[in-house]
Amino acid sequence: MRSVPKVVAAVVAALLLLWAAVVLVDDSLYFAVLAPQAHSGVEAMGALARLFAALVLFMFPLEQSASRFQWTALGLVVLGLGSLMFGYLEPALRLSTDLNTSMYASLVTRSAAGLAFVMAFAPSRPRPLSWRSTITLLAIFAFLSLTLVRLSAHLPVLVRIDSLEAAASRGETPLHGLTAWHWGFSLVPLALSLLAVWAASRRAHESRFDGWMLVAMVLLAGSQLHNLFWPSVYSPILTTADVIRLIFAAVVVVGAIIELRRIAVERSAMLVTEQAHSRRLTELAMLRADFTAMVGHELGNPLMAIRALSNMIATGELDRDEQIAAARSIQAEAEAIAGLITDVQAAATTEQEGFAVRLRPVPVSALVEEAADYGRTLPGAHAVSTRVDAREMVLADAERIGQVLRNLVGNAAKYSPDGSPIEIVAVRRGDRVRIEVMDRGYGIDPDDQQRIFEKFGRGRDRSGKVVAGVGLGLYLSRRIVQAHGSDLVVKSNPEAGSTFSFDLETVR
């Protein structure tokens, strides 16, 4: 797609060169008509079009092309102001200037604009323009224009005919009246516009280059070429150079509209991103508040129990057996607090960029049996059974996979009726081993099956109440399993139990 602007620019350049060649062969084919009102309208329309495009490029540039757009805008402003002052306001106010003066004004305007376009495309990183520097450069341009206009009588003569209007009315071209000074000075804006075309074509490979700029530069160079043979010097004559400049103005307006549309799309995308970011911040704030409340609740109950049991022991009224039972209860509550702290620390660890697992060959049967032994110590008198159809060694971080299996077995016991069975299965699946933890509990509501893997996400019991806990177990387990190159998934139906499973790679 980036080659399309080059192709279009090449076609436009070929047509302009062919047109110029035809005119040189037969000057009667040169388009030049005396139309003061039409010429003033073209100049005003072109000026407003260039100023509109300049405003868009200067005020809403792309970050990657800001300085390039600013210099392009400066060139368009120079052309627009020149057309507005010399081509529209001067005829409208009926301020007459001689042909030589008008030609100098035209040369200064187009040379200054060409220089701005060269500064836009020639450097790989154009110097940024501020509002102050832009106004300063425009002031310098205005000063030079007025100075040349005032001194034009003392400068070399560019044309030896009194009026282009008279030549146009006779069907003559002014070629015989143009001096060598005209040809020499006119080569300056032509050379600058050709240099801008060459520089813009070099930038056409850039990912953020706008192809319409290259086409516009080709049209500008074409207008300068046609201007050599019949100067368009803000006179009432409407020439081919004026027509080409009008097309140039149309192209830059279309380009400005393209930029406005692109800006609108980018701002819309940014707004969507900001809204999503805002929603995420709101969710995080709510999660933080929920987390604080949950941790306070989960810590509060064990601490209250420890305090009550400690007070009972401190009274000295308990016999030995009661003291031992109280001490064991205190120990159990302390282990609950330690488990909560471990989960919080583990959550912080898994979210660090440097979180990694240490993969070692581990017998899959050892992982399964260790999880089963843990399950048999849980309250509820669950019958924990195992089925290991794969005797392979797997690549795993034994400590972290053990944590995953303990979480899964603990959840199976928590969400199942007392005495219901829990089964841990390991089966071969190609070059991987699938480990499954199955229960015959209450099952998981379909609406909860994704939420339970989120941080602080907790499941509900058969009555619909959220089960106690901070909701970190499955979140941590999924992060650990993902670090092993797999994923933790669940299949569940209400009142039919749940099956959590993940895969581990076998040792080859």
Image (cartoon, helix red, strand yellow):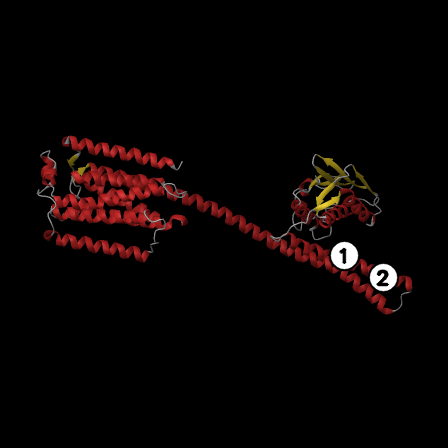
Q: Residues within 10 Å of mark 2 (few under 14, many from 20)?
A: many
Residue wearing tag 1: 336
In the image, farthest residue toward the bottom: 315
The N terminus: image quadrant: top left
- Tell me the CA gap for discs 1 and 2: 15 Å
Mark 1: secondary structure: helix
User: Type of residue at label 2?
Assistant: Ala
Q: Residues within 10 Å of mark 1 (few under 14, many from 20)?
A: some
Residue 382 found in image quarter: top right
Image mark for residue 326: 2
Asked if disc 1 and disc 2 are in contact, CB closer than 8 Å, the reply is no
Residue 54 appears at what percent x and percent y? Answer: 31, 47
User: Type of residue at label 1?
Assistant: Ala
At 18% from the left and 38% from the top, the residue drawn is: 238
In the image, farthest residue toward the front: 508
Residue 96 visible in the current orientation: no
Q: Decide if residue 265 is on the left or right side of residue 114.
A: right
At 57% from the left and 50% from the top, the residue drawn is: 280
At 20% from the left and 34% from the top, the residue drawn is: 20
Mark 2: secondary structure: helix
Residue 283 appears at what percent x and percent y? Answer: 59, 51
Compared to 200, does 303 lie above or below? below
Sequence-wise, which precedes: disc 1 or disc 2? Answer: 2
